Image (tube, rainbow, N blue to C red):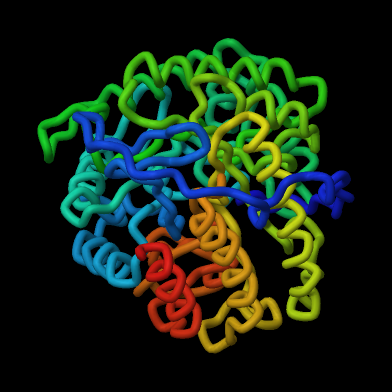
Amino acid sequence: MSTSKIKALAISAIAASATIFGACSPKPAQPATEQAKFITVDSTNIMRDGKPYYYIGTNFWSAPILASTGQGGDRERLHKELDALKAIGVENLRILAGAEAGSANANSVQPYLQPRPGELNDTLLVGLDYTIAELEKRGMTAVIYLTNSWDWSGGFGFYLRECGYGDSPNASGEGYNEYVKYSADFVRDERAMEMYYNHVKAIVSRKNTITGRYYKDEPAIMSWQICNEPRPFGKENKKQFADWIGETAKLIKSIDSNHLVSTGSEGLYGCEVDEQLCEFIHGNPNIDYLTVHIWPLNWGWAKRDAPDSGIENACKRTGEYIDLHTAMSKRIGKPMVIEEFGFCRRDNKYTLDADVETRDKLYSYVFGHVKNSAQCGGVIAGCNFWGWGGSGRPAAEVWKAGDDFLCDPPHEPQGWYSVFDCDSTTIAIIKEYTKALSK
């Protein structure tokens, strides 16, 4: 998740765009083939088991850490969380392959999968293996992102630091603009690119120590994702950014032709508010579907100091953003996934006793778009809410090593966006919509 304070921007030509409520007809189920064990794309549909796949999923980035036997590991909790999600109909998880070493200026995820370029923590790799195996047991699937544009898990700053740029500024708060300037060099530095490509090769070509299969043959993987919220970080970088997306997608497909590849982009706001660039990177033949992230508070659609009073505007702007990308998906002939969205607890509080009425409104609104799309065979294949905190509990507002992993990354207040197992109204809404999609 970005912590940027992007100002609200007018989205034009929405009325002229086709929306999910327009005329459409469901795609019939296709006969099963050997490829049926993998999730595929057929035109504007994501396909699973020979039929269009519409889903409500979640973000659960810390799963491979919980699955490890080292620092932060808790397999008992992992099993509990996966079973709880399965019970409410959530079967698609968006997870982080692992963190790179973080900046000294940021409160980054620990432990690190990649403390130094090309040096990988085997305990955490086995944790990723174990996660994939446990998902398969439950008929669940994963979208695995391979790095991050933000410093909360190392990301771009790790590669730049290793190329001699020094520690990245903290991307949070007042340091955001400096972080943007710093990170702009990522897509321009060939050495950083090479380190990143080597990491992609190492992960995607891995053999699972639990199942004995290469990752390319794992049915529990839905998609490899190039990056969490990749950005050019500057209008002057658009070409280099598009080239990097294209080269990475091509590299992944050369290693693993069985699984989908996605960008991890926020959509328009991840592309310098350039609709043409957004459409171009998602139109690449090695990218299988369009991704969208929606952050009403970060983007000024609701005020930080009075978020509840802004929920109606947040839903309105969310609908406009979805419609813009729905039209884009139709133009490029590919499905789309709203793979991040969230809203805070009442009055912007972080404690579990704060109610979630306004968050529930946004969840219902986004889930409704997926449901309507499923009913008419539309392009919106699914969504992943941000995110699952489950049985974890915040020890304090600021995360430190040894605290429970929640959905809130270490740089954000713990409990801010998390859905906990005691959030009964949110869970009831999730169950309502997963049940509707399963019919």
Task: From the viewer's side, name the closer residue of 160 and 429.
Answer: 429
**Residue 98 visible within the image:** no
**Residue 233 visible within the image:** yes
Task: From the viewer's side, name the closer residue of 196 and 344.
Answer: 344
At 82% across and 26% down in the image, what residue appears? 235
Indicate the quadrant where residue 215 lies.
Answer: top left
Counting from the top left corner in percent of width and height, residue 134 is at: 19, 52
Counting from the top left corner in percent of width and height, residue 426 is at: 49, 78
Q: Is residue 388 above or below residue 182?
A: below
Task: From the viewer's side, name the closer residue of 316 and 419.
Answer: 316
For the C terminus, give its image quadrant: bottom left
Task: From the viewer's side, name the closer residue of 312 and 116.
Answer: 312
Q: Residue furthest top?
A: 190
Q: Is residue 426 above or below residue 233?
A: below
Taking the image as shown, residue 194 lies to the left or right of residue 211, namely right
Q: Is residue 207 above or below residue 304?
A: above
Indicate the quadrant where residue 424 lies.
Answer: bottom left
At 40% across and 36% down in the image, what residue appears? 223
